[in-house]
Image (cartoon, helix red, strand yellow):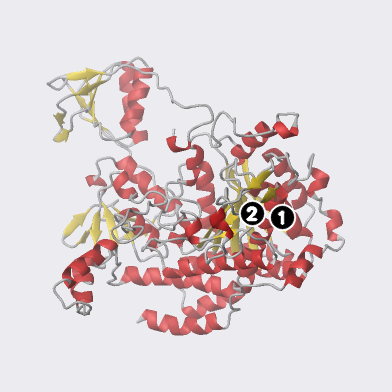
Amino acid sequence: MFRTTFASRLCAALLSSTALTAAWPASTALAQVAATATPASAVVTAPERFFPQPPGTDYFLADYDQYERYLQRVAGESDRMKLQSFGTSAEGRTQWMAIVSSPENLANLDRYRDISRRLARAEGLTAEQAADLAREGKAIVWIDAGLHATETVTTQGQIQIIHRLLTQNDAETRRTLDDVIILFGHANPDGLQLVADWYMRNPDPEKREFDSIPRLYQKYVGHDNNRDSYMSLMPETANINRVHYREWFPQIVFNQHQTGPRGMVVFIPPFRDPFNYNFDPLVMTTTTEVGTVMHSRLISEGKAGSGMDSVAPYSTWHNGMYRSAPYFHNMVGILTEIIGGPTPEAIPLIPETQLARNDEPMPISPRMWHLQDSIDYQWSMNRAVIDYASRNRERLLMGIYQMGANSIERGSEDSWTVTPQKIDALKAAATSTDRGAIDAGLFDTVLKTAENRDPRGFIINPAEQRDLPTTVAFLNALMKSGVDVEVASAPFTVNGKRYPQGTYVVKTAQAFRPHVLDMFEPQDHPHNTEYPGGPPKLPYDVAGYTLAYQMGVTFDRVLDGFDGPFRRADDQLTTPPGAVIGSGRAGFVIPHEVNNSFILTNRLLKAGASVEWLENGARVSGAQLQPGALWVPASPESTAAVRAAVGELGFNAYAVDRKPAGGAIALKPVRVGLVDRYGGVMSSGWT
């Protein structure tokens, strides 16, 4: 079996890698603080020489325009950094990625990016070939800032951290830059500009605040810019997903947030249960490793107040967040939530946080807290992640390959995923046996039945879709997340069913199989309670979100292996154009269940044309259209609009000689107002 041979070959590669380092001598920490750069620091502009005030100063926030200009300045001064645009924001600002590594690595970025891609996708590689690539490759770490713009620590700290990595010449810095390529990306340029401008507008520093900002910090989705990761609807999300899942494939994604638990400083993984049963267990154990070294680094440097697990509600179940989507792509996802901001604050006395325990090993005493204090912690945590990636470079590269290869194997043979409902079925089947002596044979007869097998793939027949443009949007969302989608170049048959040319196929024998399953299969969230029979523990976020269901996609779930005349789609799919069917001159009947019909409706109403909803639907040209079908009387304006729309928007319109019988509801143009309150409402979500 592949798994046996792969594991034996992988073992030597993993054993030869540097083991987890969980603590640092105090002398190391002091040396890092004391280390200064050689003359290179004289030519790389220090933040305090560039900004009106040094980032990290109380009552000061650098804005995005300043941040952008600073990155451009130091990119031209240092041979340890390249600055790349990776897209534009909703308001048209450039999203910048500062790529920081050794000069030698920066000279070979294309090669190291290709190695990362090949290992992450795991296609056509033997374990020996993967080990060779891992030895040659560099660990890739993504560290973002500013996703939620009122969480101001991360951007201000990133400015300092980049400067330190460009100028410090201590042994750890040189080693980590040799081993690791760090991608510093900004997640929300528009939000930073909004928040910093608002905060700095008051000439009295002690009166500065951002609680009174009139709106949230992303133009369309506010706080929910961190719930877009499997849809990629916002340009910022699409840009980051392209970097993560189609270009760079980082082994570690570090997503920095605020604020920390009360009476503490920062939350760092490990996370609490449940974790999602679709992703590879190595994701979770490696995430726990990275979180543990972050805690250990803070403690070794005397930085108290970090907590994990039960101190916060964060879990690893939901797929839609910047740090959780990587789990379904075989990547480590790190979330931190730290206190602090430009206005000093007090750490309160919370009695329960003063007793050391597993989840809070080094409590912090009440004290005043400043922005620079948070940045010092951020530096230590960034340093810990980068150091881990350096010391475990080959392990990370081989690990992402192993997980991808596991996914390809599981999608190529019969496999089973254990879910809470299946455990309930197992318990029910075991009730007839003696207490404490469950028949082990039930594992095969209850859990590993033929009908319980995981799907080998999903087949989407365009002719069966109620709303083909929305189905195509679903497939494009998968592709933006790095999933392979195939298109049939000729008719084919699977399990006795005939499918036409142009049918879409998504197989599970691919590296990002966990994401495929999570988008097609229903979620089965565990029923977690505070104690047996007690109240439920609330999920941290959405418990069920199957995207194929939400978007009304009709698909066949195939449990056996299959193949056909399939070609991989290399770019975003386009909706096949619709057509005007028939030659009638009275008007057009248009299906209502296609979301794009609303676009046409608004265009027609704006042009002054008549649009009605047919109460009984209509049967036209052999097609039965549901109640709510559109009736559009023919006119020069409406005819031109309909004929243009069918090709662009991807639905058919039926030209008929008479209006269908039955009642109809005339539509009138309406003005839509978005209700909001001053300051925005996080829970209102999307606009």
Q: Which mark is residue 184?
A: 2
Say which residue label 1 marks. 162
Up/down of 44 relative to 432, above or below: above
The reply to whether callout 2 and callout 1 are in contact (CB within 8 Å) is: yes
Quarter occupied by the C terminus: top left
Residue, x 29% and y 67% (percent of image)?
Answer: 418
Question: What is the x, y in percent for residue 120?
Answer: 49, 66
- Mark 2–mark 1 distance (CA, rounded to whole Å): 8 Å
In the image, what residue type sits under mark 2?
Phe
Dot 1 falls on a residue whose secondary structure is helix
Above-or-below relation of 469 to 475? above
Q: Residue at x 15, y 22 (%)?
A: 660
With 110 as the anchor, is 325 left or right in this view?
A: left
In the picture, measured across the screen, residue 519 lies left or right of residue 363, that is: left
Structural crowding at the residue carrying mark 2, measured as other residues with C-alpha within 10 Å and reported as few (<14), some (14–19) or many (≥20): many
User: In front here: 672 or 267?
Assistant: 267
